[in-house]
Structures are given as structure tokens and as C-alpha cells.
Image (tube, helix red, strand yellow):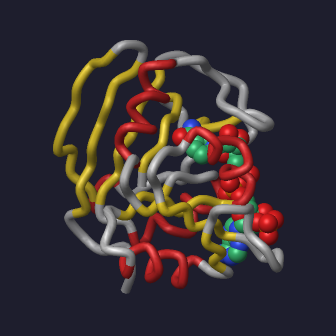
Amino acid sequence: MIAAMSADRVIGREDGLPWDVPADYAHFLASVRGGAVVMGRRSYEIFGGDLEDVLAIVLTRREHAPAGTQRAGDVETALADAAASGRSVWVAGGASVYAQVLPYADALHLSIVPGHFEGDAWFPAWDERSWALAEESAREGYVFRRYVRTASDRS
Ligand SMILES: NC(=O)c1ccc[n+]([C@@H]2O[C@H](COP(=O)([O-])OP(=O)(O)OC[C@H]3O[C@@H](n4cnc5c(N)ncnc54)[C@H](OP(=O)(O)O)[C@@H]3O)[C@@H](O)[C@H]2O)c1
């Protein structure tokens, strides 16, 4: 999963991000480029137009997904289709999708934006005992942290 968040896990406000950190957005686009990107329908409508060279798999209960994307009607199908593509699999939000996919995730690529922001969407709390910090680097306007899973959340 890849996300940008504040220290208190805010990820969104209305139809966008609560901050403007261009280096992080560029990092996001570069990270997922070439991959299979699973997104909720709302997030795809916000960010999908910026994605380049991706297989976009959009979760929706509607009959049709946005043009140029592959529809998935549930999380398991989305992840299976992404894996079957042979591309790197990325899950890029939003809040509802992060919460559903967290138990399946094996890595978290998190950009931490300093400061407090008003928001209406949050990244789910994760159990620190199941994850190890594999990488941390200060970048322009954010701190990048990569966590890898060390224990299953699923019984
Ligand atoms: N900071 C970041 O890194 C980041 C990244 C992405 C998004 N965001 C933010 O997150 C917010 C959007 O999050 P959100 O939770 O409101 O929306 P979302 O997760 O992007 O999309 C929600 C929609 O996805 C579909 N969906 C979700 N789970 C599904 C399932 N199990 N089966 C079928 N369809 C499913 C439904 O679409 P239908 O209504 O079409 O059925 C649902 O309405 C925005 O503020 C955005 O800016 C932040």
C-alpha cells in the first residue's frame, strides 16, 4: 500500500489532499508507474488522470468502472486480478480501500507530512507488532517510511 498522511493519519479532505507537497506526489506517481494500481472509485476520480503506464483496477459496486480501467467488485478480486497481471501490485486508497486491504498488505510505503491538518479521511491504525520499519529517509516536504510485514493480522 502506498499513502501520504499526517502524523495523526489524516489522508484526505473532501476531493483531495489537505497539503501541497509536490515532491511527494511525484514520488507516488513514480512509484506506481508500470504497476497494477488498485483504487477505490472515488480516489480514481480524483487522482486517476495523473497515473501513467499503469493497469488501473477500480473498486466499484457500480456496473461500470471509469473508462480505461478494469472493474473489480470486491477486494479479493481486485488483488487477484492485480497479481495475475504480473505487474507490481500497489494499493493507492482511499480510506475505505486502505482499511479493507491492510490485512492483505505486505509492505506500507508511507509519506509522512509534518504538521496537523483538518481532514475527513484517515489511514487505518496498524498494529506496530506486525510491522518493521525497513527504511526511513527525510525528503523535500515529507519523511518517507517503508514498513514490511513481520506477522499476519489474519488468524
Ligand atoms: N493521502 C493519500 O495518499 C490518499 C490516497 C488516496 C486517496 N486519498 C483520499 O481519500 C479520500 C477518498 O477515500 P474514500 O474512502 O472516501 O473513497 P475511496 O476508498 O477512494 O472510494 C470509495 C469507493 O470505492 C468503492 N469501493 C470501496 N470498497 C469496495 C468494495 N469492497 N467493493 C466494491 N467497491 C468498493 C465504492 O465505489 P462506488 O461508490 O462506485 O460503488 C466506494 O464508494 C479522499 O479525500 C482522497 O483525497 C488520499
- The x, y position of residue 20, in whole percent, is 59, 17
Is residue 2 left or right of 95 when viewed as pictured?
left
Q: Among all residues in the image, which is located at the extreme left?
A: 134
- The x, y position of residue 25, in whole percent, is 49, 29
Q: Quadrant of ligand 1?
A: bottom right
Confirm whether residue 122 shows in the render.
no
Is residue 3 left or right of 107 when viewed as pictured?
right
Answer above or below: position of 120 versus 64. above
Answer above or below: position of 68 versus 8. below
Foreground pick, 32 / 154:
32
Foreground pick, 39 / 121:
39
Answer above or below: position of 17 versus 91. above
In the rendered image, the quadrant that contains the C terminus is bottom left
Answer above or below: position of 6 versus 151. above
Confirm whether residue 104 shows in the render.
yes
Q: Tell me what residue is drawn at x 47 percent, y 80 percent.
A: 81
Foreground pick, 53 / 116:
53
Q: Tell me what residue is drawn at x 50 percent, y 52 percent.
A: 125
Q: Tell me what residue is drawn at x 63 percent, y 47 percent.
A: 48
- The x, y position of residue 31, in whole percent, is 35, 43
Is residue 121 left or right of 129 when viewed as pictured?
right
Q: Among all residues in the image, which is located at the extreme top?
A: 140
Which image quadrant is residue 110 in? top left
In the rendered image, the quadrant that contains the N terminus is bottom left
Q: Tell me what residue is drawn at x 17 percent, y 45 percent.
A: 134
- The x, y position of residue 55, in whole percent, is 49, 62
